[in-house]
Amino acid sequence: MPKFLHSMIRVTDVDRTIGFFELLGLKEVKRFDSEQGRFTLVYLAAPGDEDAQVELTYNWPPADGSPAEVYDGGRNFGHIAYQVENIYDTCQTLMDAGITINRPPRDGHMAFVRTPDNISIELLQDGRLEPAEPWASMPNVGVW
C-alpha cells in the first residue's frame, strides 16, 4: 500500500514560513542543512499526525553572489489542505497575525489563505459550523 510522506514547497524565508504554519498548529519535526548542496529542508507536521508532513525547501543563494532564486505562481502547486477544529477560530488567529483570508469561511466549512510564498492553503472544518458573521458577509480577496 502506498503511504503519504510529504508535500514539498519551495520557500524564500524559512522562519517566516514556519511562523505561518505554526499559526495553523504545525510544528517542526526534522531539519536538514546541506552545505554541499546549498539547501535547507524543514519538515513540519500536525501534532499526533507526524506521518503527514510538509517539506519546506530553501535553496540558499549561490555562493558566487548571484541573485537567489525567485518563485512566483504558487497556484501552480495547487494547494495543501488541513482539517481544523474550528474554522472561525483558526481564521481569526490568522487574521490577528496579519494573514489575509482570501476565501473566507462563509459556509462554515471552507476557507483559503496563502503562505508567505503564495502557496494556497485550504482550511476545512471538521464537520460543519453554521454560517456566522462576520465571515458570512466577507468578500473574497485576491485569488487562492
Image (spheres, rainbow, N blue to C red):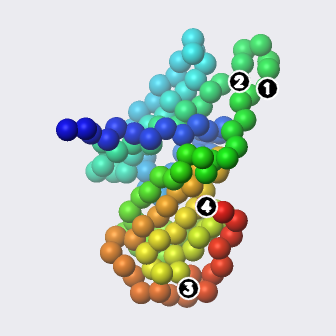
Q: Are marks 1 and 4 in contact (CB under 8 Å)?
A: no
Contact? badges 1 and 2 (CB < 8 Å): yes
Q: Is residue 35 above or below residue 58?
A: above
- The Cα atoms of the two marked residues, 1 and 2, are separated by 6 Å
Q: Which mark is first along the chain, 4 or 1? A: 1
The answer to whether the residue labelled 4 contacts the one labelled 2, judged by CB atoms less than 8 Å apart, is: no
Which residue was labeled with disc 4?
144
Q: Element under label 3?
A: helix
**Percent of width and height locating residue 59:** 62, 27
Mark 1 to mark 3 CA distance (whole Å) = 44 Å
Q: Quadrant of residue 53?
A: top left
Q: Image check: 72 left or right of 124?
A: right
Specify which label sits upstream in the sequence, 1 or 3: 1
Residue picked out by circle 2: 61
Residue in the picture at 47% in, 58% down: 24
| Percent position of residue 118, x then y | 64, 51
